[in-house]
Image (cartoon, rainbow, N blue to C red):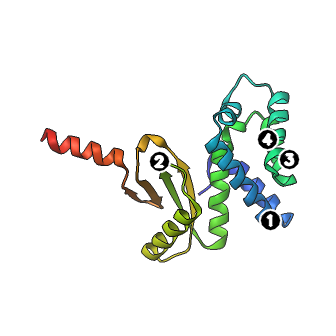
Amino acid sequence: MATGLSGRYARALFALAIEGKALSAVEASLTSLRQALAESADLKSLIGSPLVGRGAAGAAVTAVADGLGVDGLTRNFLGVLAANRRLALLPAVIRDFAALNAHRKGEVTADVTAAHALTDAQRQALAAKLKAGIGRDLALNVTVDPAILGGLVVRVGSRMIDSSLKTRLENLGQALKA
């Protein structure tokens, strides 16, 4: 589930959120951060750059947190990541936190890669289809990757459904070579 360094940070944040009865607030804040990371190349570059010093990274990430309206615990957590020069782990921490929260709720996490951002209606329809197929409640972890061109790649546990246009074109190319 939540392993490695990102898993340790996620477990620490998860424990603090439960202890402080702020689990839903932290979950909402991390969702906002995930969306901001998906939409902003500048934010991705900020968290991934080794050239940005601790103080500057801390100030920048605090400003981003304030702009997104994240809760106090998550804001402080981002400061700790910046101080420890671990902001690059943020996407993995968010993913691991979501997995911990889904496990606590008895849900399965479905990692979905889409070519474009999904609307709320599309997310709900996808969740309903997957729930019908799996037979359990699930949480969607959606990432956007334009490289797949179209369609979706869905991973639930060890199962993967790849309906991406990129894979279909590669398969067609292989079939034409044979």
For badge 4, the amino acid type reads Val
Q: Is residue 129 above or below residue 89?
A: below
Q: Is residue 1 above or below residue 39?
A: below
Total number of numbered labels?
4
Label of residue 115 in the image: 2
Label of residue 18 in the image: 1
Q: Which residue lies at the image location 77% right of the left edge and 54% below the top edge?
A: 13
**Residue 20 occupies quadrant:** bottom right
Q: Earlier in the sequence, mark 2 or mark 1?
A: 1
| Whole-number angstrom distance, CA of label 2 to CA of label 3 | 33 Å
For badge 3, the amino acid type reads Asn
Q: Where is mark 4, residue-wise?
A: 64
| Whole-number angstrom distance, CA of label 2 to CA of label 1 | 34 Å
Q: Earlier in the sequence, mark 4 or mark 2?
A: 4
Report crowding for label 1: few under 14, some 14 to 19, many 20 or more residues within 10 A (C-alpha).
few
Label of residue 112 in the image: none
| Whole-number angstrom distance, CA of label 1 to CA of label 4 | 24 Å
Q: Position of residue 152 (x, y in %)?
A: 43, 54
- Which marked residue is nearer to the observer: mark 2 or mark 1? 2
Local SS, label 4: helix
Q: Which residue lies at the image location 67% right of the left edge and 69% below the top edge?
A: 104
Q: Nearer the viewer, residue 49 or 40?
A: 40
- Which marked residue is nearer to the observer: mark 2 or mark 3? 2
For badge 2, the amino acid type reads Ala
- Which marked residue is nearer to the observer: mark 4 or mark 3? 4
Q: Nearer the viewer, residue 74 or 28?
A: 28
Q: Earlier in the sequence, mark 1 or mark 4?
A: 1
Q: Earlier in the sequence, mark 4 or mark 3?
A: 4
| Whole-number angstrom distance, CA of label 4 to CA of label 3 | 12 Å
Local SS, label 2: loop
Local SS, label 3: helix
Q: Which residue lies at the image location 83% right of the left edge and 48% below the top edge?
A: 75
